[in-house]
Every structure is written in structure tokens, then in C-alpha cells.
Image (cartoon, helix red, strand yellow):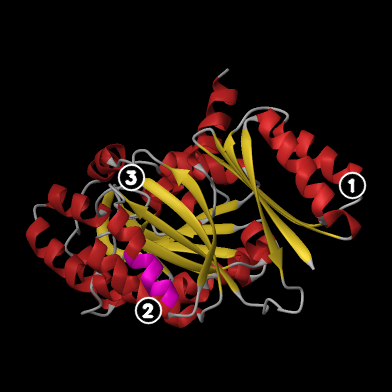
Amino acid sequence: MSLLLTVTGRDHPGVTAALFDVLAEHGALLDDVEQVVVHGQLLLGVVVSGPGDGGPLRAALEARARELGVEVEFTPLDDSVEVPSADRHHVTVLGAPLAPAAFAGIARRLASCGANIERVLRLSTYPIAAYDLLVSGGDTARLRTELAAEAVAQRVDIAVEAATLWRRARRLVVMDVDSTLVQGEVIEMLAAQAGCLDEVAEVTSQAMAGELDFEASLRARVALLEGLPVSAVDAVRAQVQLTPGGRTLVRTLKRLGCAVGIVSGGFTCVTDDLKAELGLDHAMSNTLEVVDGRLTGRVLGRVVDRARKAEALRDFAALEGVTMAQTVAIGDGANDLDMLAAAGLGIAFNAKPVVREAADAALSVPFLDAVLFLLGIPREEVEAADAADAG
């Protein structure tokens, strides 16, 4: 029979070493150990077996625990009861704020799916709260369905990802550009320069919601830009602003050795500059035809539409030598759906309802670097890396 030791109390250096010295002195065999410190309070769980799991060990541990100012409890474990192997998932929860009611609702949904929370890790407290729950048991599809409903009820974001080796592997992250990496729609900014903003904005809204064919709608919108001088295009390019957290996301991914790309139904006049400015590895978008310093109202070559975006993701993955399971795609509109479906992890970022419903994960916060939490990267590690570079 094995013995579970549960140690609690104020944490300070030397507690774990002293208790394990006692275990060694009594010949105990170490079967399992977990330790966590929450706001200075220690919770240490140790499973031991062998000759050193009897009365003398208990007495010695209790005496040493008193000296250390901690408490130890003993729970015999029945070795004949097998713990069934189960699939594991990372459930990432984000909110501003993240209330106890949200955790309660999530825990109930997990239990209803036959899943159990094994570990909770804090990823961030500001500007949004984010926690990673390691969950055992449960079917991926059902977990996503149940937790998506709870996310709506609690007004939080919840993502479910299988706990596999790929979560720790090198990633290829490919983003949409307009309303994802950058704020707003570039074609609408161009339309404002051409005096046809209302007409273009209406068509853009319908296309992003999946109500219109993207290629046909793009060609129709670009036709309205005929005659716009290149100087106006340059002015728009200078006005483009990154989404908050976008630069941090790219910088952190590059530090981790990930490849980062963009694929856009927008235009090279913007994406070429973004690729150079951010040091991106890949970029694909549409090229506006220019003759005698003015737009002709036509797009050169094949339009980057919904299907082409998914192809680009696969092409970039092949160039980087990564599997599709290692890819992450981020987008907001209907023309991103194929790309999100093809990726190992598809993330809807402040997306249209049709996209949120189809994606593996959905973020509704205004910070693009929240994507890092879905990859299990704590905010404090990001800030520490930034501080080290600044120093």
C-alpha cells in the first residue's frame, strides 16, 4: 500500500529538502510528487511506498514538520485501484474580470463531460486574467461545445486544446491582417480617400460575414478605387496602426523560434511594410494595379480569397518543415474559415459569429498578445524577456 503525504503551511527555503531527507533516511520509495506555492502558502503532495511508509516514518515526518512550521497529513492509498488513463486537454480561461462564478460554471461543465481538473496555472492577472487548466478525461468536441456555451453565459473566453507534444513544439503562426494584426479595414481607408466609403464598407461587412463571395466582392470594391493616386495609397499606409499587443505577440513568438506569417485579402502596399517592420517570415496578399501613378481599379493575379489563405498556410508550413498540427491560424472574417479549419489551432479574434462558432478557440479581448496565453505562455515570462532585452 502507498501513502500520500500532504504538506501545507507557509513556504520558505529548505522545507522540501528537509522533508525529503526524512523520507531518504527511512528508505521510502518515491512514487509521485507535486508541489505548488500560492501567495506564499505551500501545498506539497508526495506518494511513497516500500518499507519506509509505516509508523516510524510518520512520527519522524510529524516531528520534522513541527520544526519547519508546516503541517503534514497521511492518507493510505489502495494500490489495487487503478487510475484509468485519459486524454488530457488544456482549457484556457480569460476574462476581465474573471469571477468565481465563471470558475464554478466551468467546473460544472467539465464534470458533466466526465472531465476532471488536475492542475490550474495562472498565466496573467493584468490587463486580463488568464488561467490554464490541465484537464483529464472528456471528449474534445463535447468539451468545446459545452464550454463555448458557458463562455457566452459568463462573458469570458474559453479555449480547449488537446494536451499533446505539439503544444511544446516549434510553431508556425499565420495571421489575417485587417481587423486582426492591424486595426480596421485598409480597403475602407482607401475608399475614404476615394470618396466611396459608405458603399465599400457595406460590401466589406457582408463579405466578412460570409454573405457575399469574397473574390467578387473584392473586385467590385477595388473597381470603385479607380483613379485614386498613389500618393493617397501612401497616406493610408502611414495611417495603419497595429492592434494592441500585436508587436508583443510577434516579438515573443520570434524569441521562441516560431515562424510568423501574414496572409491577407488586403494589399501588398500594406503587408510588405508590415513584413519588413515586424521581421515576419512570410506574407501573402493582393496587388493593386497602378498605371501612370493611379489605381486602375483592378487586382493583379490570383485573388487571395478563402481557399488561397488555407493554401498559403500549407505552403508556409512546408517551407518551414513543420506539420499542420504545429500551425496556428488567427482571423476574424468568413474568408479566414478554411485557414482556421486547416490549422492545428484555429483562433477567432474579435470575429464575426460564423467564425467564432467554427474556430477551435475564440478571443473577444482587444489585445492580440492574449494569443500567447492559448499557447501556455505566462505574461510574467514575456515581461521578463522584454526587461532583459531592455537592460
Query: Disc 3 and disc 1: Cα gap in Å?
Result: 59 Å
Whether residue 7 appears in this view of the structure is yes
Label 3 crowd bin: few (<14), some (14–19), many (20+), radius 10 Å: some
Quadrant of the drawing holding the N terminus = bottom right
Q: Does 241 sit above or below residue 69? A: below
The picture quadrant where one finds residue 238 is top left
Amino acid beneath label 2? Thr
Of marks 2 and 3, which one's residue comes earlier in the chain? 2
Label 3: which residue?
243
Camera-side mark, 3 or 1: 1
Q: What residue sits 39% from the left and 40% below the top?
A: 125
**Mark 2 element type:** helix
Amino acid beneath label 3? Thr
Label 2 crowd bin: few (<14), some (14–19), many (20+), radius 10 Å: some
Query: Disc 2 and disc 3: Cα gap in Å?
Result: 29 Å
**Mark 3 element type:** loop
Callout 1–callout 2 Cβ contact below 8 Å: no
Label 1: which residue?
26
Of marks 1 and 2, which one's residue comes earlier in the chain? 1
The picture quadrant where one finds residue 220 is bottom left
Q: What residue sits 19% from the left and 55% below the top?
A: 188
Whether residue 363 appears in this view of the structure is no
The magenta stretch is: 105-111
